[in-house]
Image (tube, grey):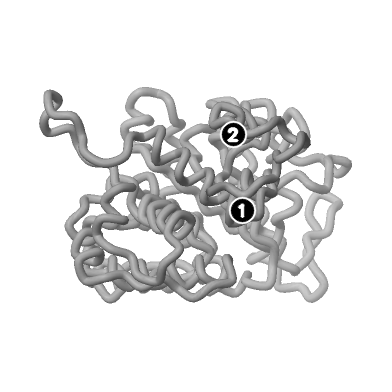
């Protein structure tokens, strides 16, 4: 996903998405963002935060798909129960994000146990909010021997999913009470195919960001290259578009991108299994990208691995297969041709 905190485009879908973000940004109730893989879900979540009154408060994103149930329990609450204790680690999400926004990405990956704890916590926050609203006494309102301060320390909850949560409720994989709670406000992020007329503007935006990142002038796409981008279905949506453009920029040293350069990185469906596909094989394209990136970083393996989003050991293994000397050996930092 690009680092730009905006929805680029002039299509009706883009306008509607921006308007929907504006409408929910000041609400205190949860927001559920739905979309296909590769759509701008993360961007939408951050836009909701920065366009609302909580913009100066913490924004914490927790990817539920990369943690175990036990890890998510600790990261959310810091304890085994559904309520952060006073001595719970200060870094646990429900304490750290108070007053700001907590974004649970891939919320469908939460285990039923953590879902229950989350529901219990959210309901307790609702009761506390009602008590706070009922208090009109300056300096706070005392209840059960404890003072409820007037400062808003509630959490704005945003969740996201790339699967059908309603179907998961039907199959008992997602709690119905949590579903009802988080889907009070729903934002559907359109696929790139639905807003094909935005592809040109999105492409220019991505190329500018890549150029700034690499310290070079933005690449220019030929009209045929633009036509090729617009005719493609983009099953991976904006993420796939950015990935293709990043690969082209890593390999090509010229100033203009042609349709052939674009096509070599696009995933094409197998229309005829008896006909051998033209162009580079997957392994050849991978080697071309790795060697071009290595050359761009002057043979620096750590920076190359980071740019390719792979481990240094993985990179070194592939370079060894290509005939490069072992890491640290003579000629190991040679420039790739």
Residue 36 position, x and y percent, is: 34, 46
Q: CA distance from mark 2 to mark 1?
A: 41 Å
Nearer to us: label 2 or label 1: 2
- Quadrant in the picture for residue 277: top left
Task: Say few, some or many: other residues with alpha carbon within 10 Å of mark 1 (under 14 / 14 to 19 / 20 or more).
Answer: many
In this orientation, which residue lies closer to the viewer: 330 or 59? Answer: 330
| Residue pictured at 59% horizontal, 34% vertical | 319
Q: Is residue 176 left or right of residue 62?
A: left
Residue 94 position, x and y percent, is: 70, 48
| Residue pictured at 45% horizontal, 63% vertical | 253
Residue on which disc 1 sits: 102
In this orientation, which residue lies closer to the viewer: 72 or 3? Answer: 3
| SS assignment at label 2 | helix
Residue on which disc 2 sits: 319
Residue 87 position, x and y percent, is: 88, 41
Q: Is residue 12 left or right of residue 2?
A: left
Question: Could one spot residue 140 in this view of the protein?
Answer: yes
Pointers 2 and 1 in contact (CB under 8 A)?
no
The answer to which of marks 2 and 1 sits earlier in the sequence is 1
| Residue pictured at 53% horizontal, 45% vertical | 291
- Quadrant in the picture for residue 318: top right
| Residue pictured at 58% horizontal, 52% vertical | 295
Residue 12 position, x and y percent, is: 23, 71
Judged from this view, the residue extending furthest toward the right is 87
Question: Could one spot residue 126 in this view of the protein?
Answer: no
| SS assignment at label 1 | strand
Task: Say few, some or many: other residues with alpha carbon within 10 Å of mark 2 (under 14 / 14 to 19 / 20 or more).
Answer: many
Residue 166 drawn above or below residue 256 = above
């Amino acid at each position: 996903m690009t680092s730009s905190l905006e929805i680029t485009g002039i299509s009706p879908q883009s306008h509607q998405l921006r308007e929907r973000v504006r409408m929910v940004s000041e609400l205190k109730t949860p927001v559920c963002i739905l979309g296909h893989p590769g759509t701008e879900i993360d961007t939408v979540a951050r836009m909701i935060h920065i366009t609302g009154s909580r913009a100066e408060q913490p924004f914490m994103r927790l990817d539920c798909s990369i943690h175990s149930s036990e890890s998510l329990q600790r990261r959310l609450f810091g304890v085994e129960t559904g309520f952060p204790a006073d001595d719970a680690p200060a870094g646990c999400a429900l304490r750290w994000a108070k007053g700001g926004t907590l974004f649970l990405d891939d919320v469908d990956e939460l285990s039923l146990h953590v879902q229950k704890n989350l529901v219990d916590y959210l309901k307790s926050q609702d009761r506390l909010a009602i008590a706070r609203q009922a208090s009109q006494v300056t300096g706070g309102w005392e209840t059960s021997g404890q003072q409820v301060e007037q400062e808003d320390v509630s959490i704005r909850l945003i969740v996201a999913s790339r699967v059908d949560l309603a179907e998961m409720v039907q199959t008992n994989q997602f709690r119905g009470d949590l579903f009802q709670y988080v889907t009070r406000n729903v934002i559907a992020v359109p696929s790139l195919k639905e807003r094909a007329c935005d592809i040109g503007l999105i492409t220019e935006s991505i190329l500018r960001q890549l150029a700034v990142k690499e310290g070079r002038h933005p690449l220019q796409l030929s009209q045929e290259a633009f036509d090729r981008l617009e005719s493609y279905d983009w099953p991976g949506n904006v993420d796939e578009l950015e990935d293709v453009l990043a690969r082209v920029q890593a390999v090509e040293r010229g100033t203009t991108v042609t349709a052939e350069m674009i096509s070599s990185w696009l995933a094409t469906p197998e229309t005829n299994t008896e006909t051998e596909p033209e162009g580079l094989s997957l392994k050849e394209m991978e080697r071309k990208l790795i060697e071009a990136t290595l050359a761009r970083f002057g043979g620096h393996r750590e920076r190359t691995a980071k740019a390719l989003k792979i481990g240094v050991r993985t990179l070194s293994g592939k370079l060894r297969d290509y005939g490069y000397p072992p890491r640290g050996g003579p000629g190991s930092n040679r420039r790739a041709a």
